[in-house]
Image (cartoon, rainbow, N blue to C red):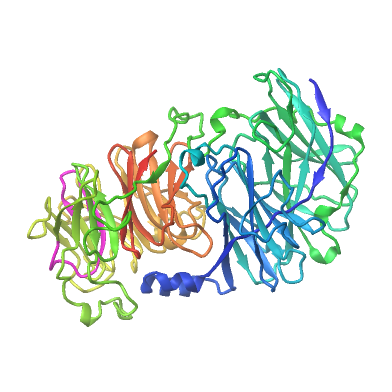
Amino acid sequence: MAGQSSWILLCVVILSVGVTTRSLEDYYGYYDYDEALFRRSNQQQDEKENLEIRMPDVHPVKHDSYFCTSMKVSDADTYIVGYNPHAEMHTAHHMLLFGCEVPASQEKSWNCGDMGVGVCRSGSAEKIMYAWGRNAPVLKLPKDVAFKVGGSTIVKYLVLQVHYGHVDKFLKNPSLKDQSGVTLFTTKQRSTHLAGIFLLAAGGSIPAHQKAWHLDVGCQYDNPAVIHPFAFRVHTHKLGTVVSGYRVRNSKWTLIGKNDPQRPQAFYSIENAPEIERGDYLAARCTYNSMSKKRTTYIGATMKDEMCNFYMMFYYDPTSTNSAPEESCGYMPQQMLNYFPADSNVPLPGSGEKMEMKRDYIEDDACPHCKRTIPLLSVKENWPQGGSQTGELPIKAGQVTAVSLDSKGNVVIFHRSSRAWMGDTFDDHNRLAEKYQSPIIENTVAWLDAETGKILREWGAGKFYLPHGLTVDRDNNLWLTDVGLHQVFKYGPGGSDEALITLGTKLIPGDGWNQFCKPTGVAIDSDGSFFVSDGYCNERVLKYTPSGDRITMAITNAAFPASFPRPHSFNIPHSVSLDVQHNQLYMADRENGRVLVFDSKSGKLLNSLTGFGSRVFAAHYDPADGGLLHVVNGEDGQSTVQGYTFSIAAKKTVQTWRPKEGFTEPHDVASNSQGSAVYVAEIGPNRIWKFVQA
């Protein structure tokens, strides 16, 4: 096995932000008043806010372009506790965020050349704060750990650097602009531990026709502060097969992290992380397969070159040192790099080309669908037809609360027309205020053509008080919930004059077996039996016989076994959806930020799906590709409001999606029978979105 060793330790940080500051209060003013009240009562009051830095509509026209943008940070000490990237690997090859004392330019954006050149002004202090590549997801730091910027620190500016590897899409479309960037979750609350990033970066060259060529780099740590690694990230270009990093103490090599650089280039958690003390060595190895190459490949900044980077994110006690730990790594004897563990360049199981695009593949070799490409979802522009902009309905619609599809593929929506859920809509006993105790006089249900979005018909005038949930069954019956009436209805196809089933007591909330309190949704099983999520007050799911005359199951907080992850209670069961083939019921446990999975025959709690942020508004089961779950979340001050496609087989999110301008408050989600289109109902602005497979 041939190799070449060299060492470079880069501890640079780019932190530049074309920043928009949005506090939680700003968000609340835009959303429904009732939702704002709920969030205010449940949100920690620790002065959290978001900083958003994005490229200011740049249009790169040269392959391997590097653009930077910057903004001054607050004069007060500010603590960054998480990052949410806004980029797609087909547009941006990678992004780096640096902290600078002074940026290299005062322009709105500038060409900052090769990696690390032209970011901060020459002679100005700089440090790496964040790195992103290959569709890496949201990163949240451990509790009481943060990057400190502004105020008393040397980081006075944030600089975002984006590398545009291939720019063919920009050359084909002169009007195309890019706004790649990142949202920083920040707080003014002081953190006990500060975070930093070591970057071990090797130089050198990779000869052609080598199956496992490696480049090595190392340094000796020399700072009194004990550092605690908690996440790592690797980066190479196409030839990289594995990158591994180690702590070396008394000739013993302890693994810090190892990963396939063709996987999403995220920061991954470190299990059983070793502490690093003064005198320890840090070493990294990058392994490449150059069998397809006819000439030598060099480490460099272009897509034709290669890279060898091992990032280690750590925390430390700032009272234990007067200098930055990431600036305290010196010479490592060259001969020490000859003793890497034998498995340091062995690829991880499942590594390879299929791992390249996180959002395109279901990565689970145990599943027959796992190697199938999952096409990315993107907004259908100019849909629905007749609206003044994409997503806007051509009729006067109120808060769009629900969406479903009939057997012909038509899109059916439920909306509140001229009525809205406000702070005075209900009294303290969940009863509808007297001034709202009359039906909405306008139509509240509309059918749209799936192709064009053209309105086919409307219905529902004079029947509903405060619409919430809608499901269309296989016979095109309409199942609707009304949180103002505290009732559940079944109407015939197209909307019959009279309800076929009416459950609950009109305008009277209650927790008895014949009552509801603000019911949220309905799911219908293959035998005609149905589930109702009795969400805002009673926090339960009830199963009924097909005729609705008898309850056959009640899923309550008693369903939680002692060993199940907490909390052991529901917090607004907001929607329900069924996988009838596998007898599984999916319930969006809204304010607990999870989707709970139950056996639909026994009511047994099977699983909890998380990773969607702290608020989950709806989850819809789609049988395509071995079983997918489309999920929409809600604003929580930290997570991006977006849709998720979760693979049941692979047990992970395989892509995220949202409109270019972002969601405000998505409330419900549904997909067509082929799984080729996903629809989202949004409250404020009142829109219906169509996402189609690219």
Numbered circles on residues, count: 0
Give the quadrant of the N terminus: top right
Q: Is residue 256 left or right of residue 682?
A: right
Q: Residue at x 53, y 61 (%)?
A: 638
2, 102: nearer the viewer? 102
Q: Is residue 361 above or below residue 490?
A: above
Q: Residue at x 84, y 58 (%)?
A: 225
Give the quadrant of the C terminus: top left
Task: Give, as a single range, the part of the protein colored magenta.
Answer: 460-478
Q: Is residue 413 above or below residue 359?
A: below
513, 113: nearer the viewer? 113
Q: Is residue 640 left or right of residue 78?
A: left
Q: Is residue 33 magenta?
A: no
Q: Is residue 475 magenta?
A: yes
Give the quadrant of residue 322. Answer: bottom right
7, 666: nearer the viewer? 7
Q: Position of residue 111 (x, y in %)?
A: 65, 49
Residue 241 visible in image:
yes
Q: Position of residue 631 (x, y in %)?
A: 40, 50
Q: Position of residue 511 (x, y in %)?
A: 28, 69
Q: Residue at x 18, y 41 (%)?
A: 408
Q: Tell me which secondary structure the magenta stretch mostly adopts.
A: loop
Q: Is residue 74 left or right of residue 589?
A: right
Residue 532 visible in image:
no
Q: Is residue 417 left or right of residue 192?
A: left
Q: Position of residue 468 (x, y in %)?
A: 27, 63
Residue at the extreme left of the image, as rendered: 497
